[in-house]
Image: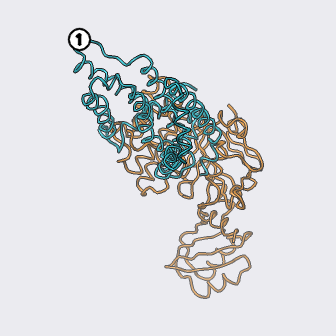
Amino acid sequence: MITDIFTIVWKEIHEMLFQRGRFRGGWVGMLFFIAVFGIFMPLQSGRSWVESPLSLVYWSWIPFLLGSSIVADTIAGERERHTLETLLASRLSDRAILFGKIAAAITYGWGLTLVSILLGLATINLVFGKGELILYPLDIGAGILILSFLVATLAAGLGVLVSLRATSVRQAQQSFSIAFFVLFIPIFLVPVLPDEWKIRAIEILSRVNLRMVPVALAGLLILIDCLLIWIATARFKRAQLILD
Amino acid sequence: MNPIAIQTQSLTRDFKTVRAVDDLTLDVPAGKVFGSLGPTGSGKTTTIRLLLGLLEPTQGQAKVLGFDTRSEAARIRAQCGALLEHNGLYERLSAETNLEFYGRIWHIPSTERKNRIQELLTHLDLWERRKEITGNWSRGMKQKLAFARTLLHKPALVFLDEPTAGLDPLAAASLREDLSAMAKREGVTIFLTTHNLAEAEKLCDQVGVIRQGKLVAVGSPETLRGQGSIPRVRITGRNFSDRLLASLRSRSEVKDVGLDAGILTVELKQDGSLTPLVNLMVQEGAEIEEVNRMKASLEDVFLTLMEEEK
């Protein structure tokens, strides 16, 4: 099954690179992103691009934004372009197709993030290093790698799940946006909470060990990712996909 | 090799209140081209989906290449190729990459895959254009490429769902020739659906006529033509007088008589004999040059079978 998953990833990456039927189309978007996050932003931020703990926050969410731009296209796109039934009529198993789609979205979202991180490190060292090697602190570096992977998986799982039942890419993108919005409802609710609730929350947060936040977040993400993949696996029914 | 490629027993599939496939019992011999002939909406595509194990039957069972469609669908799909209602090509990718992808799906080793892609594309006159994005191709070229994809892994059985639908007559004829040549060359069993009678007549060794999900006739095109044969005679000659026509119409074995542009057409009843009629015509002064028994075309048979529905 691993070979089959790689085959699906191989095809998906080819399609991403050849967006709009041109080799240039897919590459331009990717290179633009890499240039912004690997060169421009590090030059603007200086050493803090690497040394600030805030880097953990933005690098964790970038794979979600990247993944979300392509993941809705995976199954809904195949359905819209009438390639899904032929794929389902092949020897590939349901799981190989599903995990291949998820793996492709992770490869794209996480892969681009890693390339940008490495390029950013190179930029910082070349411009601000002055002979000294600047690296992410070990805990932040490990946090970035783990959280960005888990967030890329979150985008992939959520995207494939909404893409399974969507009749078109547009519908999948709309559903994905709604799902994304639902994830952030707790943040939007903060301003309308009663004052005593807010005070109580601040008291609790002030007692929290901030170093444990990424660990807790990683735990929560692992739970959500597993749940999403489990639901997607359960809902991936060949006959249903054809009749949809 | 199993001599029967497809065997169905009372195969039935319902969609809510609609019965798409109704009690289909059928044997398709291996190595033959079988045509499932029927109008749009007669259940042909559903039959293919059932045979590939993409849908489960409501009742009955089917075996494809000896495997049960319910419990061994994955093994069936591993040994079959399918060109379905839509060609299923990735239009952002080149022809070569499309085949490369499906070659990888079927685990064809790299060198063999490359050779096979070259072989198929060369035979279908597409090799020179292999690097082109297929989205820019004509429908006919896309269908040819999709056909190449179905043969890529040398399947034992190929399903073709209306392969020439939507093609212009030239492209359709070209694809039909390729289908026929490649089927013979590869020695593959083909299950083909079509509503094109000429296509069925040209390509198929056996034809099953489907009406509202039911198999109403099956046999070789020749046999079917024989079953539906209308005993009609075309007589060329001179001196076909009104009196002669009246005499012919009065005969018990004659169903109908028509004269058009000097050609006399006599429709006989099923057991009607021709010899006494020819004698009568000669006696009445007709000069007969040629007498032809007319054969029913597959279209006549098909229309008769469809007419029975009404």
Pick the front one: A64 or B6? A64
The quarter of the picture where residue B235 lies is bottom right
Which residue, given by chain and number where applicable, does mark 1 sit on? A131
B241 shown above or below A4: below
Residue name at image x 28 percent, y 28 percent: A42
The quadrant in which the C terminus of chain B is found is bottom right
- Residue at image position (28%, 20%) is A122
Q: Where is residue B29 in the image (x, y as percent from the top left)?
A: 67, 41
Q: Which chain carries label 1?
A: A
- The spot of residue B271 in percent (x, y) is 74, 69
Q: Which of B231 and B248 is in front in this view?
A: B231
Q: Colour of chain B?
A: orange
> Above or below — where is B35 with respect to B153?
below
Q: Which quadrant of the view contains residue B17?
A: bottom right
Q: Any idea which chain is the cyan one in this picture?
A: A
Can you say whether B190 is above or below B214 in the image?
above
Please state which of residues B125 and B100 is positioned toward the viewer in this rendering.
B100
Q: Is residue B159 rendered to the left or right of residue B147?
A: right
